[in-house]
Image: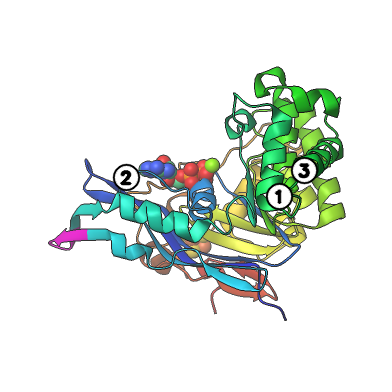
Amino acid sequence: MTAPLLEIENLRTYFYSRSKQAFIRAVDGVTLSIARGETLGVVGESGSGKSVTALSITGLVSAGPGVISGAIVFRADGVEHNLLQDLEQYVRLKERDGRIVEASKDEPGWRKAVERLMAPVRGKEIAMIFQSPKSALNPFARVGDQITEAIRLHTRAKGPGEAKERALHWLERVKIDSPRLRFENHPYGLSGGMCQRAVIAMALASEPSLLIADEPTTGLDATIQSEIVGLLAELKAEFGIATLLISHDIRAISRLADNVAVMYGGTVVEHGPAPDVLASRFAPKHPYTTALLASIPSVQNVRDKGYLTVVEGEVPDAVDLPRGCRFYARCNRVTDDVRDKCAQHEPELQEVMPGHHVRCWLYAE
Ligand SMILES: Nc1ncnc2c1ncn2[C@@H]1O[C@H](COP(=O)(O)OP(=O)(O)O)[C@@H](O)[C@H]1O
Ligand code: SF4
Ligand SMILES: [Mg+2]
């Protein structure tokens, strides 16, 4: 078996809150991997740590004393990159009575180290698409020139003529309306949907090994959303680029993802083949996944229940994560057999079927 393209091992990304004198545990023990050609869908409510996971992979975690630990290994072109190598040396923690009372960081040193680690991969081997496509483009440069520049920077097509031809090809490939005209446009001349197509063209034009798409359709009109999902499905079939797809749109995830990871409170609570994780009748399943699936406003749900359900309760406070299972306060499947364990101890991610893992005491050996 070949090694995965991306391996994330026990990733923890914390932000220090001076006022609370505590860490915001945005990502708290994420282990995931992506194989070549695989699309991994990541779902979970807002605040569960999806975006911070993506930012940690791409070295874009910014705010002040943010601390990242664990390992992120990315393999491309026969080279193994440890994307977090030696970063912890730039952070100093001061503890008093078992509490961290101060966290300081050599921000310039950290930034420099991150840039050194990311230089060979970001934009070239790992391309990103975010929620707001306009902010991904330079407002002062023509769309076509930006794509041409990415091609010259990241691929073998170095000559301006050749790179421009490639850029036009990519604009056509993402089916942007009037590609030659759009090439000349500045981003403000493009609609939100067109901008997202241009950003996708720019991402693919760099011929990356991994695409990270964080809520790529959020904020677009419903019709445009489904067009973009359709485009991503076509591109997946044609190019098979490994993709980390973060979306709260479970229908998009079920159309595009091979495997799905469900995140809750900064960690992964279920991970397995998309058809199994997303099938509401498939058991074993994490109680949170069940609740999340029940919250999708499907025609069937509305017909069965006569109303739309949402997952009751709130996501746990990332400053004060519970000691036991992070879902305990909202879980409706706790039995007397497991109650104490649920309250006191965090369950491990257990393999419940080949390739399918669930973090819940109900399925622990
Ligand atoms: N730069 C930051 N500084 C402090 N807290 C942050 C920062 N970025 C994210 N967080 C917190 O981390 C948690 C996870 O955020 P995020 O990954 O954006 O969630 P998601 O993408 O799943 O909605 C949230 O509680 C959020 O408030
Ligand atoms: S471990 Fe307990 S509280 Fe957590 S999801 Fe399972 S049953 Fe619910
Ligand atoms: Mg997010």
Mark 3 or mark 1: name the one nearer the start of the chain.
3
User: Does the magenta segment cover residue 96?
Assistant: yes
**Amino acid marked by disc 2:** Gly
- Residue nearest the viewer, comparing 25 with 117: 117
List x then y, in percent, for residue 149.
Answer: 67, 40
Can residue 20 be seen here?
yes
* Front position among marks 2 and 1: 1
Which quadrant of the figure has residue 2? bottom right
The residue that appears at 53% across and 56% down in the rendered structure is: 119
Q: Please tell me whether mark 3 sits on a helix, a strand or a loop.
A: helix
Q: Residues within 10 Å of mark 1 (few under 14, many from 20)?
A: many
Range of magenta residues: 93-99
For ligand 1, tell me if the residue under mark 2 lies within 8 Å: yes
Quarter of the rendering occupied by the N terminus: bottom right
Task: Give the residue furthest to the left.
Answer: 97
Q: Are marks 3 and 2 in contact (CB under 8 Å)?
A: no
Q: CA distance from mark 3 to mark 2?
A: 38 Å
Relative to residue 171, is residue 210 drawn left or right?
A: left
List x then y, in percent, for residue 30.
Answer: 50, 62
**Amino acid marked by disc 3:** Ala
Q: Please tell me whether mark 1 sits on a helix, a strand or a loop.
A: loop
Main structural element of the magenta stretch: helix, strand or loop?
A: strand
Q: Residues within 10 Å of mark 3 (few under 14, many from 20)?
A: many
Q: CA distance from mark 3 to mark 1?
A: 11 Å
* Front position among marks 3 and 1: 3
Q: CA distance from mark 2 to mark 1?
A: 31 Å
Mark 3 or mark 2: name the one nearer the start of the chain.
2
For ligand 3, tell me if the residue under mark 1 lies within 8 Å: no
Q: Which mark is residue 163?
A: 3
